[in-house]
Amino acid sequence: LPKHLKRLPRGVLRLDEVKAVMAQPDLKTPLGYRDRTMMEVLYATGLRAGELVALRLPDVDLTKKAVRVRHGKGGRERLAPLSTPCCRFLDRYIREIRPELVEGLRPAGNNWLKKAGTAEDFLFVSIYGGLFSPQWLSQVMKNYLHKAGITRPIQPVHGWRHTFATMLISDGMDVRYVQ
């Protein structure tokens, strides 16, 4: 039987769209800075949503410009390189922004203190100082795509992964290495 042709992913952002989305978070607020840092990590590494929310502080090595992904697909562990701008965002986020977020920025009913500080050593934390899910990350990214005026169908987080891979291949990297 003839082989089916594999199609390229449709949800790939162009460079101007990536810049437009990254310009959306307000870097003067802790949440805006956290969201921009997450975008930088996604764009620099091509991580999956579950891998991003599972990152811990010890997994980030800014001197080597790499992040260790402990729970990748199939339970595999790998190192992902970080870009210089990504390292700058991560450095400030870890030193200044994350400690503020771990304390919890706002109460949420009577049990917000139960959520505050429950993130342990996870890298990215919610507004309450606790963990967040890949679904929450997807919703946040979807909001930024909408604010940037991108109306075509793009998967909010996985689209960044496809964009990352497409940019690497268009810059001449071997497809096998990107895989």
Image (cartoon, rainbow, N blue to C red):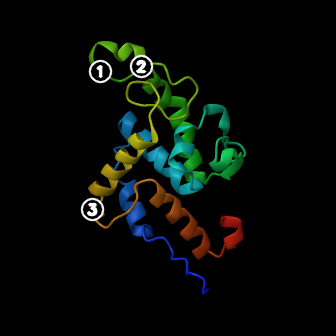
The three-letter code of the residue at mark 1 reads Ala
- Judging depth in this view, the residue of 14 and 74 nearest the camera is 74
In contact (CB < 8 Å): disc 3 and disc 2: no
127 with respect to 67 (left or right): left
In contact (CB < 8 Å): disc 1 and disc 2: yes
Residue 128 can be seen in this image:
yes
Query: How would you rate the neighbour count of disc 1 (Cα within 10 Å): few for under 14, some for 14-19, many for 20 or more?
Result: few
Indicate which disc residue 7 carries. Answer: none
The three-letter code of the residue at mark 3 reads Gly
175 with respect to 12 (left or right): right
Q: Is residue 44 above or below residue 14?
A: above
Indicate which disc residue 149 carries. Answer: 3
- Residue at the farthest bottom position: 2
Indicate which disc residue 108 carries. Answer: 1
Residue lying at 52% horizontally and 59% vertically, measured from the top left? 161
The N terminus is located in which quarter?
A: bottom right
Element class at badge 3: loop
Residue lying at 48% horizontally and 45% vertically, measured from the top left? 38
The spot of residue 175 in percent (x, y) is 67, 72
From the image, tell me which residue sits under label 2: 115
The numbered mark, 3 or 2, whose residue comes first in the sequence reads 2
